[in-house]
Image (tube, rainbow, N blue to C red):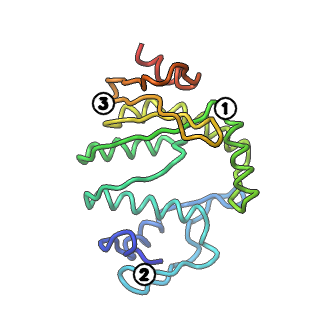
Amino acid sequence: MDLKIYHESLDALKLIAFLKTKKKKLNQKTCNLLSQEPELLDKHHLVFAIQDIDSYLAARIIDFIRLEFLSLKISFTFETVMSHISKVEFLRMAQEQGFKTYLYYVSTVDPEINIVRVQYRVSTGGHAVPEPKIRDRYYRSMNLLMQAIEVSDRAFIFDNSSDGEKAAFLAEIEQAERLRINPIVTVFPVWFAERVLAEFE
């Protein structure tokens, strides 16, 4: 792995130390994220054992990079399903460190839409996600939406329910206080009405 492609200040030794503190679930058991020490080639390059390379490792590496970018005061963007409170806490941490935070939240009217889209992705060679996990993430993300808005300087809300069309821009929220509705939209998705509009009434 070459950390320089992300930023020249990222340190491979520091990444290894970070990953050594992390755990993962394997066959219903909790174990160390790394089964063996990665090979350190130089300050920016390291090689992981093949058996350690999985989605858990990738996620923790991204966690490390995000935290380093906060420390280095580097502006960045990241994508998440936002189904865990840690993502909201990260936005709060960024604000506390002087960052301007911008949330672009995209959802659909029904998790079954997401399931069908994942099935299509699998049919074209993409990775699968179990249906119960898709539904669970959908509702957990919804439940965290207002908390995420509260730690965002500006939030932009979209509905992406229609296939083959651009996601519909619904509203912008500034400082979790000022709601600006897109004047073109006349009918709002139920999830937006219940999770966002109701909070501003």
Q: CA distance from mark 3 to mark 1?
A: 28 Å
* Left or right position of 18 against 137: left
- Give the class, few, some or many, for how many residues have Cα within 10 Å of label 1's Cα (few <14, many ≥20): some
Q: Nearer the viewer, mark 2 or mark 1?
A: 1
In the rendered structure, find residue 17 and report the number of the disc placed on it: none
Residue 123 x %, y %: 76, 57
* Pointer 2 with pointer 1, Cβ within 8 A: no
Marked residue nearer the N-terminal end (3 or 1) = 1
For label 2, the SS is: loop
- 20 and 82: which one is in front? 82
Q: CA distance from mark 2 to mark 1?
A: 43 Å
From this view, report whether residue 110 is shown above or below residue 74. Answer: above
- Give the class, few, some or many, for how many residues have Cα within 10 Å of label 2's Cα (few <14, many ≥20): some
Disc 3 target residue: 175
Residue 7 x %, y %: 34, 70
For label 3, the SS is: loop
From this view, report whether residue 52 is shown above or below residue 140. Answer: below
